[in-house]
Amino acid sequence: MKKIVVLFTAGIALLSLAAPARAQVIVKDTFQEATNPPDNPQNLEMAGAKPSPVNLPGATWQLATGDGTYESYLTPPATTAAACFHNVASVGLSLAGNGAYVKPSVLTVSADSAFAGDSATGVCLLGFYSALTGPHTANPVANFTGLELQKNGALQLIENGVPSATAISYTGTYDPTKPVTLSYTIDTGKGTISNISLSGSTSTYSFTSKAFTNAATAFLGIGGQTDGTSMSYFTNLQLSSGAGTPAQAPSPAKTP
């Protein structure tokens, strides 16, 4: 009888060890900050806003590139709450430790991305910055390591501002005006990227990298590059600890 008890207890211990750690949401931004904008509701500057409803680093969005209100701004929920980027603009959010929060080595990032306007080209950037070049600069991939969603649906890896040799095409029917969910996992200890997913596409995203180091991912970053008649925009941004965080459902197909 004692042997049975011991074996049963050991089995419970093994099961406990096998249970995966639960992912923790570090940053979640639904871009509702423009609910009661003080000035023009279409041009509430994103720089200076804080992510909500979750912001464990306690940081504030800062301009990484571009100019302020007309290039990087928030729209009110009545329009479709979104972070919008016109011309060449991007923002960064420090992921430095703060109190009980310590930046994990494995992170999963996701967001819904789309385009507005009639230009044939444009990109949405979802990833990280090692440093922010600051206002009035015109290269949103400077110091950027992450993925670039192009207006034709293709994905391209960017490593410290340098694009990979090839982009991977979207397999399926892609409409740039309808949000798609892009998500992926990084390991800053190894510098790797994995679990890349783009909703609606059946392509295999086989990018390999060693560029996603702790230093290269000092800031969470989003942004875009479009011509004068278009914009890129984001909704439902989330950064979580660990791998395998469930992808979010895309937002309704509504242009800001």
Image (spheres, rainbow, N blue to C red):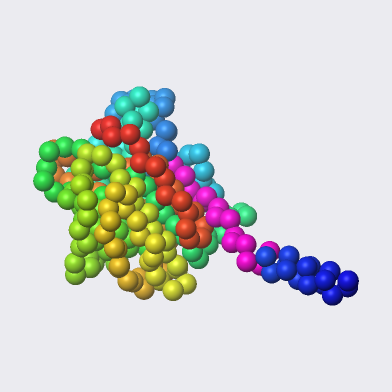
Would you identify the image quadrant in which residue 220 lies? bottom left
Query: Up-down: is 209 above or below 168?
Result: below
Query: Up-down: is 5 above or below 176?
Result: below
Residue at x 52% of width, y 50% of height: 25
Residue 225 visible from this viewpoint:
no
The N terminus is located in which quarter? bottom right
- Could you say which is closer to the camera, residue 137 or residue 161? 161
The C terminus is located in which quarter? top left
* Residue 221 x/y as whole percent: 36, 53
Residue at x 47% of width, y 72% of height: 189
Residue 232 visible from this viewpoint:
yes
Left or right position of 227 against 46: left
* Residue 135 x/y as whole percent: 28, 49
Would you identify the image quadrant in which residue 248 lies? top left
* Residue 6 x/y as whole percent: 82, 72
Query: Up-down: is 238 above or below 7?
Result: above
Residue at x 20% of width, y 58% of height: 169
Q: Residue furthest front?
A: 1
Instruction: Let me know if residue 119 is in the magenta part.
Output: no
* Residue 170 x/y as whole percent: 22, 55
Query: Up-down: is 39 above or below 109?
Result: above
Task: State the count of labels.
Answer: 0
Residue at x 32% of width, y 63% of height: 145
Q: Residue furthest right?
A: 1
Q: Which residues are magenta?
A: 16-29
